[in-house]
Image: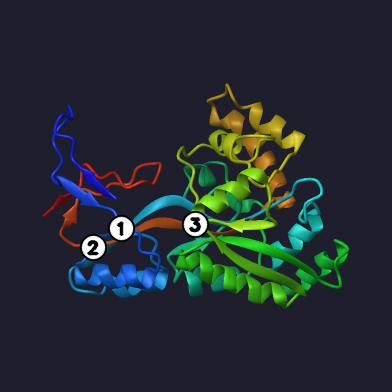
Amino acid sequence: IVLKANSSFFAEQPYFNRIELLVIPESSNRLAMLSTGDVDIAFALSAAELSRVEKARGVKVLSIPDRQKLNVGLNVRKGAKFENVALRQSLAYAVPYDDIVYGVLKNRAAKSAGPMSVNSRFFDLYNLADMPSYYTDLDKARDMLKESGYGDGFSFELITAKGVPHVEQAAASLKASFAKIGVDMTITPVSQAKMAEKNGQGTYDAFMRDWLTDYVDDPYYHFFLWWGTGVVINWTGYSNTQVDEWYQSTAAIVDDTKRRAPYRNAIRQLIKDSAMLWLADGDYTLAVRDDIVGITLHPDTLLYLRPLKRR
């Protein structure tokens, strides 16, 4: 795709008159082309690749605090494989959190503590650190699996974002850990288009996209998008009328001292219900040639091209 500057645009003309967007499926090839200067910006490199490339001459890695989350969404609709709460909780205790944070993400992230990112200002404001959260405990995971009625084992399919190395590596880590409690997880990489189709139709067992983020750092925005019954990107199909009442009760309230209690209640219930496996909270990272400037992080985490310049 070739983008050309619009000479009739009302604002200041961009530095670059032409920008070419290349689709390079393999992250190793993106890494090599950035290192040699064949491209100026490379997206979706793994944490290990970022660590390597930041040592290369002429390359810099930007790491900007953000509210990105790496999650596994579970289909909890009636009749779906993960309608069973105890089954979902068993997987939450079988997640190898340290392997993902330190092994896959190379300490470029923190263990997630639930639906709100640890980098959200509300995490401290509402004292969410004292919320119950899951940790790796395979014995407890096996007990929960028995409680769910699947003590003899269970199998399901995880669809993953194709061509995203940290997603592929995290999925492999999950598969190995789940196998230790008798759960067989099949990993199926799919295109972004197929992922969107399956998420929208609810035709999947579990999904793992790339990093997800809230454009607005506010719990009402978060619940209205992700967790309210029937809301716009409630891909898991989660529905809890009490959670709906808690978050909707704050719609016209701006005083955080009055919002705090209903949101703490809603978040505590959401963690208990485990409609997602919250794996890690990370920063926004981007590898670029060191003479490229003008990069700023916007709430939508999209790269705005017009401000870019070559130093």
According to the picture, the residue beneath numbered tag 2 turns out to be 39
The picture places residue 42, in percent across and down from the top left corner, at 31, 61
Residue 124 in sight: yes
Q: Quarter-wise, where is residue 108 in the image?
A: bottom left
- Mark 2 element type: loop
Label 1 environment density (alpha carbons within 10 Å; few <14, some 14–19, many ≥20): few
Query: Where in the figure is residue 230, as x and y percent of width and height?
Result: 67, 34
User: Does residue 158 appear to the left or right of 36 in the view shown?
Assistant: right
> Which of the two labelled residues, at mark 1 and mark 2, occupies the earlier sequence position?
1
Disc nearest the viewer among 1 and 2: 1
Which quadrant of the figure contains the C terminus? bottom left
Residue furthest left as drawn: 311
Q: Earlier in the sequence, mark 3 or mark 1?
A: 1
In this rendering, the count of numbered labels is 3
Q: According to the image, what is the colour scheme of the structure? A: rainbow
The amino acid beneath tag 2 is Val
Residue density around tag 3, few if under 14, some if 14–19, many if 20 or more, within 10 Å: many
Task: Determine crowd level at label 2: few under 14, some 14-19, many 20+ residues with C-alpha closer than 10 A.
Answer: some
Residue type at tag 1: Leu
The reply, left or right, for residue 17 in relation to residue 77 is left
Q: Up-down: is 101 above or below 262?
A: below
Q: Tell me the residue that label 1 is attached to.
A: 22
CB atoms at circles 1 and 2 under 8 Å apart?
A: yes
For the residues labelled 2 and 3, the Cα–Cα distance comes to 22 Å
Q: Is residue 176 above or below residue 204?
A: below
Outermost residue toward the front in this view: 1
Please tell me whether mark 1 sits on a helix, a strand or a loop: loop
Name the front one of labels 3 and 1: 1
